[in-house]
């Protein structure tokens, strides 16, 4: 090939390579975001988050009402659900102390306003003054109270007798922290498994437990599953006596049933728990009479050192108490408690 033709060919190849390089540089420049485009994308994300925060969510409560919830409740009043809101780290600004003090410490209650209430009514003026954006109440309040609370702000009615973890999950929905509720339950279940392992040598396979309470009306009651069941049966592996199961058949969610002292042995398990209302002076003499009776002292559980007197918090099934009971019940069953 002549030198002139070779030179021409090399020139063409050089031009093509140069054009290709310029094209690649142009593509790379187009793909790289500028500071201005970065700022624009960040602004879009912030705007989307702001819109979500200003939105509402729907929830069907225990009365079958569809309630519009704030996206992120910031000022919560909870009548009888203080433990659940506290467990999920919600901003609880008001509750009825008479119930909450069973599960919450004095330090926790110090920053939470008292809204009154003896189980039926609440102090409407106190709640109004708190300017809540969400009110959570149990389904045993009368309709008049619910109607008044609805005029203050968003009000949700929950089934107070519902299974405790289902109740916690629902309050997680109300607070828009379902993930926290699920994490709390998972942590609890892991702790329960640890406690069962510690009790393997202490509890026999199929060992039963039952619980009783004596009120100031001198009436004796045997507990069903709903209160001590989650701890004694589900968490620690004890069984409910067949007689108790049959007594509550068809009414498994019922709190308790009245029995006579004479039939107490029929419902006593291998281990028995007596819930002591120590703040009820009128009950003290009746309690001592029962605990000193031949019926109580002749129980196999008593004679085997497996009859326990426990305080009234044991009869609660809120999340803070259930977590507390994992330690308390395990220590008691192992003989390491002062109960």
Image (cartoon, rainbow, N blue to C red):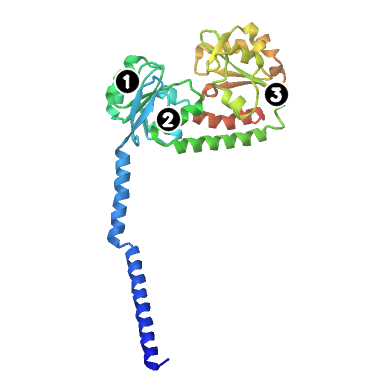
Question: Measured from the top left, where is residue 181 in percent x and y?
Answer: 47, 35
Separation (CA) of disc 1 from disc 3: 48 Å
Under tag 3, what secondary structure? Answer: loop
Say if 39 sits above or below 138 in the image: below
Where the N terminus falls, by quadrant?
bottom left
Under tag 1, what secondary structure? Answer: loop
Q: 11 and 294: which one is in front?
A: 11
- Disc 3: CA contacts within 10 A as few (<14), some (14-19) or many (>=20): few
Q: Quadrant of residue 147?
A: top left
**Is residue 105 at all visible to an observer of this figure?**
no
Tell me if 81 is positioned left or right of 200 in this view.
Answer: left
The label on residue 123 is: 1
Which residue lies under the disc numbered 2?
171
Tell me if 245 is positioned left or right of 99 in this view.
Answer: right
- Disc 1: CA contacts within 10 A as few (<14), some (14-19) or many (>=20): few
Say if 294 sits above or below 207 in the image: above
Q: Is mark 1 in CB contact (under 8 Å) with mark 3?
A: no
Observer-side mark, 1 or 2, equals: 2
**Is residue 241 at all visible to an observer of this figure?**
yes
Say if 94 sits above or below 31 in the image: above
Separation (CA) of disc 2 from disc 3: 35 Å
Question: Measured from the top left, where is residue 215 in percent x and y?
Answer: 52, 12
- Disc 2: CA contacts within 10 A as few (<14), some (14-19) or many (>=20): many
Tell me if 287 is positioned left or right of 16 in this view.
Answer: right
Which residue lies under the disc numbered 3?
206
């Amino acid at each position: 090939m002549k030198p002139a033709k070779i030179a021409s060919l090399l020139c063409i190849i050089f031009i093509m390579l140069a054009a290709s390089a310029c094209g690649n540089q142009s593509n790379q420049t187009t793909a790289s975001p500028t500071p201005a485009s970065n700022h624009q994308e960040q602004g879009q994300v912030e705007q989307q988050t702001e819109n979500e925060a200003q939105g509402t969510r729907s929830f069907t409560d225990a009365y079958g009402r569809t309630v519009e919830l704030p996206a992120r409740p910031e000022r919560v009043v909870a009548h009888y659900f203080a433990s659940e809101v506290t467990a999920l780290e919600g901003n609880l600004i008001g509750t009825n102390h008479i119930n909450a003090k069973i599960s919450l410490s004095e330090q926790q209650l110090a920053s939470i306003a008292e809204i009154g209430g003896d189980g039926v009514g609440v102090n409407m003026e106190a709640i109004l003054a708190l300017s809540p954006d969400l009110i959570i109440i149990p389904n045993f309040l009368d309709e008049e109270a619910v109607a008044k609370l609805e005029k203050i702000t968003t009000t949700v009615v929950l089934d107070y007798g519902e299974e405790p973890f289902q109740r916690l999950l629902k309050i997680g929905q109300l607070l828009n922290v379902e993930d926290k509720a699920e994490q709390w339950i998972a942590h609890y279940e892991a702790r329960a498994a640890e406690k069962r392992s510690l009790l393997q040598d202490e509890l026999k396979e199929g060992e039963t437990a039952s619980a009783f309470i004596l009120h100031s009306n001198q009436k004796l009651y045997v507990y069903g599953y709903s209160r001590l069941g989650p701890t004694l049966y589900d968490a620690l592996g004890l069984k409910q006596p067949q007689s108790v199961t049959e007594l509550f058949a068809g009414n498994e969610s019922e709190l308790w049933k009245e029995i006579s002292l004479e039939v107490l042995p029929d419902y006593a398990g291998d281990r028995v728990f007596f819930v002591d209302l120590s703040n009820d002076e009128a009950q003290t003499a009746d309690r001592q009479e029962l605990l000193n009776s031949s019926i109580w002292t002749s129980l196999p559980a008593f004679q085997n050192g497996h009859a326990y007197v426990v305080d009234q918090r044991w009869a609660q099934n809120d999340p803070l108490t259930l977590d507390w009971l994992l330690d308390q019940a395990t220590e008691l069953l192992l003989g390491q408690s002062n109960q």
